[in-house]
Amino acid sequence: MRATLLFSLALAFSSHFRGSALARDSAQQAAQSALELLQNSTTVVTVGEPCGPNRTEPCGPDRSAPVAVNGSSAPVALTAAEKETASAEHKKTVMDQLEKLAEHLQDNEKKIAAMDKKDQADHEKGTADNITKTMSPADAAMWANFNEFNHRMNEKTKVHSLDVISKIKHAVHFIKKGGMGDDADAAKGLQDVIASMGEMSGNFLH
C-alpha cells in the first residue's frame, strides 16, 4: 500500500515538476536570447562601410555580408538614403525580435503561475486528505520539501521574467530614441540595460 502510494505521488509530482522545470528553462533561454540579440546589435556598422575578412567589401544590412545588386554578389556603394533605410530596417528587426521575446516571457510567466497554483492546490488537498499520515517522517518531509522547492523556483522565475520583460521594454525605448545610432544619451541608456541584463543572466534562478 505504502509503495503504491509513494509511486503514485512520485509520478504526479514528477509530471508537475517536469512541466514547471521546462517552463523555467524556456524563460531562461528567452532572457539569454534577448541579451545576445542586444549584444550583437548595439554596434551598428553602417551599410556600405568596409566589411568582410579583408575589410574590402561594403557591409550589408546584416553587418557582414556584402551588398548585392540584382542578384549579383559584386559589392556596390550605397547612397546615403539607402544606408539610412538599411539601418532603420535593422533597428526594426531588432525591436520586433525583442518584443516577441517579451511576449513569450509574459505567456510563459502566466503558464508557470497556473501550474504553480495547481501544484499548491494539489499539495494542500493531499495534506487535507491526510496522505502524509501513511508516510514515514522522512517521506513526509520529502513530500513537503519537494513542493516547497518547486514553488520557490517558480516564484524566482516569475520575478526574474518580469524583470527581463521590463529591461526589454527599456531597451526598445532607447533603441527608438537612437541608442543604436548617434544619440549618446540613448546609447548609454541602452548599454546600461545590457549590462544589467548581463549581470542577472547567469543567476536567473539563483
Image (cartoon, rainbow, N blue to C red):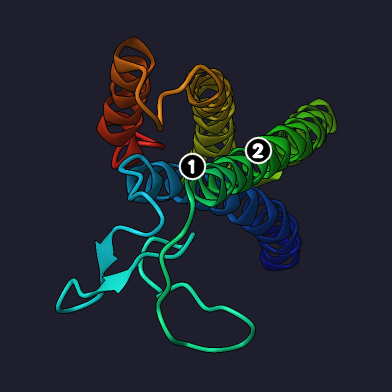
> Which quarter of the figure is the C terminus placed in?
top left
Q: Is residue 16 visible?
A: yes
Question: Residue 38, percent across and down?
Answer: 41, 41
Q: Is residue 75 left or right of residue 72?
A: left
Question: Residue 127, percent across and down?
Answer: 75, 29
Q: From mark 1 to mark 2, how far is it between C-alphas?
A: 8 Å
Residue at 74% over, 67% down: 4
Q: Is residue 38 left or right of residue 202?
A: right
Question: Residue 74, percent across and down?
Answer: 43, 86
180 or 197: nearer the eye? 180
Labels 1 & 2 near each other (Cβ < 8 A): yes
Write down the residue under mark 2: 105
Q: Residues within 10 Å of mark 2 (few under 14, many from 20)?
A: many
The quarter of the picture where residue 65 lies is: bottom left
Q: Residues within 10 Å of mark 1 (few under 14, many from 20)?
A: many
> Which quarter of the figure is the N terminus placed in?
bottom right
The residue type indicated by label 1 comes to Ala
Q: Is residue 89 left or right of residue 178?
A: right
Say what secondary structure mark 2 lies in: helix
164 or 121: nearer the eye? 164
Q: Earlier in the sequence, mark 1 or mark 2?
A: 1
30 or 45: nearer the eye? 45
206 or 188: nearer the eye? 188
Write down the residue under mark 1: 31
Q: Is residue 133 visible?
A: no
